[in-house]
Amino acid sequence: MVEALLRGEGAVQRRALAKAITLLESTLPDHRAQADELLTALLPHSGKSLRIGISGVPGVGKSTFIETLGLHLIGLGHRVAVLAVDPSSSVSGGSILGDKTRMEKLSVNERAFIRPSPSSGTLGGVAEKTRETMLICEAAGYDIVIVETVGVGQSETAVAGMTDMFVLMQLPNAGDDLQAIKKGVMELADLVVINKADIDEDAATRARAQITSALRIFSQQGRALVWAPKVIQLSALQGDGVQRFWDEVLAFRNSQQAAGELAARRQHQALAWMWERIETGLKQAFREDAQVKALLPGLVKDVEQGRIAASTAARRLLDAQGNTLNNATNNVPNIV
């Protein structure tokens, strides 16, 4: 698989890439071990792409914009990978995974790879294995990796912690200046795009002015001054403003590289990724603990029926796991 990813071409490489991502997303223990080996082998070949995160509410035109941008970048000689995250149903657990159908031209282009993934309950608008998937795509030679979030609102901040540049897309009639200021996700945006400007140019101009004012307030609150976030307006459907967008992206990358911010950002992201996986592993180990499993059904029933406080039940379960860990430590023989 490694050979096909690194040196394969066309359909052969895309098949290997799809299989590798499926392996990453598997929850089976033996698959997890294979995925770790694959990541270790590919890690030296990753890290050479530009990672762009794109977020925005449903209907803002993310998929249309990404397809237009992707085709434009391919025309400039780039290879583009799109990781589209779809919201999972809280009832059935399923996802539509329909982003490929909205990117008809890009999805059939040989220099593009589109992978829809379910969020599977992961918060922050991204999937659990998005970081690992980015590394696989980079090793396969895709020099532009675009992460499209699920598009559910202000909580979609996780993508800013795994990409080089965070782009927030807004509609021309997104609300007044107070509405723009209170959106917490905007504080993290490196570039704000007012899409569908062709529908109402006056509204787009007003939105641009309001968001620009909001971003000035954020800069006065201590945000780094290496790059001043910009606001631009465009029409993805018409293709107007896409080159202006790309010019701003290149300007951002150049300023970050010159100041050493890009390398520092990726180092910070790598450590955050490590701690995130540790937290996930600890939660899984907690659920699989024998003493926790024995106590859990009774405590769940007690909490549901109001016989015990949820915090007390949680403490008892944590103490039970702690006893398991202490017993395991005490049974380790001393080596003199």
Image (tube, rainbow, N blue to C red):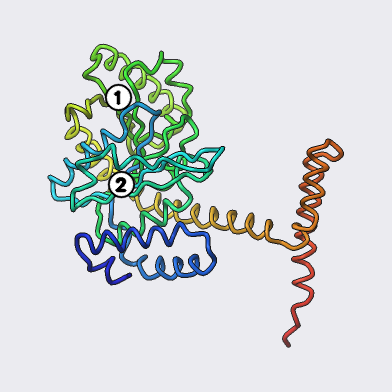
Circle 1 sits in a helix, a strand or a loop, which is it? strand
Cβ atoms at labels 2 and 1 below 8 Å apart: no
Which residue is located at x 29 percent, y 24 percent?
Answer: 194
Q: Nearer the viewer, residue 107 or 244?
A: 107
Circle 2 sits in a helix, a strand or a loop, which is it? strand
Q: Label 1 amino acid?
A: Ile
Residue 197 horizontal/vertical position (percent): 24, 20
Estimate the spatial distance between the alpha carbons at disc 2 and disc 1, rounded to whole Å.
21 Å
Assign the C terminus to one quadrant of the image.
bottom right
Assign the N terminus to one quadrant of the image.
bottom left
Q: Label 2 amino acid?
A: Val
User: Which quadrant of the structure image shows residue 226?
Assistant: top left
Foreground disc of the pair 2, 1: 2
As displayed, is residue 110 above or below residue 290? above
Residue 167 horizontal/vertical position (percent): 34, 35
Direction right: furthest residue: 307
Q: Residues within 10 Å of mark 2 (few under 14, many from 20)?
A: many
Q: Is residue 61 left or right of residue 307?
A: left
Residue 146 horizontal/vertical position (percent): 31, 45
Which residue is located at x 36 percent, y 62 percent?
Answer: 19
The residue at which mark 1 appears reads as: 194
Which residue is located at x 77 percent, y 60 percent?
Answer: 322
Q: Is residue 45 left or right of residue 297?
A: left
Q: Nearer the viewer, residue 108 or 128?
A: 108
Tag of residue 176: none
The residue at which mark 2 appears reads as: 82
Residue 303 horizontal/vertical position (percent): 80, 40
